[in-house]
Image: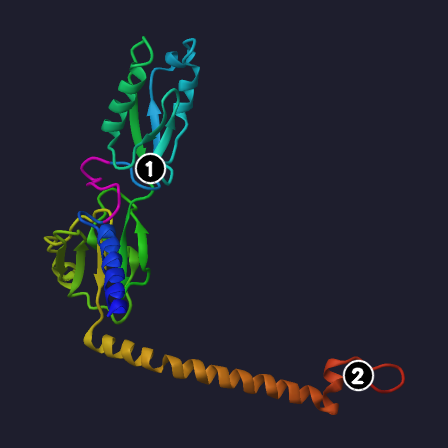
Amino acid sequence: MLVALLLAACAGVEEKRVRQLLVEKGFGTVAQGVAAQEDYIGAGDGVIFYFDPALALTPGMERLALLATPQTPGLDGTIWVPYVGPVKVLGMTARELGTLLSEQLQAQFKPEILIECRVISAGKGFYAFGETMARGWQPFLKPDFTVMEAIARLGTTDFANLGRVRLVRPDAQNPLVVVINFREMVLTGNTTYNLTLQENDILYVPATFFGTVARFIAKLLQPLGLMVNAVFGFASVRSAYEYLQDPDAYGLYYPPYYGGGYYRF
């Protein structure tokens, strides 16, 4: 009885710890937003600042010149700002960050300071799965990257069901799934569902019925194929070993010496 109570208590503590880690809103990343409307700083993005060059020539403000060097947020989502120190920027828009740094630096110096920020996007992309030639995380190649452009770039396998392409917009509360008839879009030119991809979108291309059957059979026979390859590999090694043991084969592998025979080791 006591053991059962202890196990239940341990399970309850573990469940509470897991519950604390669950995503409550959005995709699960710190930086979230719609980059096509107003770009924001994400993981892997660069940040560069613009300001009056004369400020860096003012005595006591020389280190402001370091702001002209592009920075990438660290693992803690911060960049280093002269006279301020680490500043958490992950998820902020360029306008928000420029205003924040202007206020923080203005509080320390008398000359008027106006900082402008630019986000150099490099870490934003989407996910591709299913019957696509390229899978996994894919970077955006242009600001308004659409479904048609994405599939054309990714390529599809012979098993792809282009009439049931799914665009999944993940969210912990309100995920959205849009089924797109890509084949009809190509044949008719109706671009109603040629949606613009957003960061962390999932593009899933399912297989046709026969493609699903073919994939199932391939996975079913995969262990057998590995076993057959192993057996044939062992047989090949054994055959080579036996061939090398044949005295008549020495002339193919060992040079003759002047005594009329072959070197044997």
Kindly give the residue lying farthest to the front in the view shown: 2
Callout 1: few (<14), some (14-19), or many (20+) C-alpha neighbours within 10 Å? Answer: some
Above or below for 113 versus 37: above
Locate residue 261, reporting x and y percent.
84, 87
Q: Which residue is mark 2?
A: 264
In which quadrant is the N terminus drawn? bottom left
How far separated are the C-alphas under marks 2 and 1? 67 Å
* The stretch drawn in magenta includes residue 136: no
Q: Is residue 37 magenta?
A: yes
**Can you say whether 135 is above or below 106 in the image?**
below
Badge 1 is on which residue?
A: 77
Say if 92 sits above or below 137 in the image: above
Q: Residue at x 26, y 67 (%)?
A: 2
Q: Which tag, 2 or 1, sits closer to the chain's start?
A: 1
Residues at discs 2 and 1 in contact (Cβ within 8 Å) = no
Residue 209 against residue 137 in the figure, above or below:
below
Counting from the top left corner in percent of width and height, residue 65 is at 42, 20
Magenta stretch?
28-39
In the image, taking residue 263 as reference, residue 191 lies left or right, namely: left
Q: Position of residue 72 (x, y in %)?
A: 38, 36
Q: How would you rate the neighbour count of disc 2 (Cα within 10 Å): few for under 14, some for 14-19, many for 20 or more?
A: few
Q: Main secondary structure of the magenta part?
A: loop
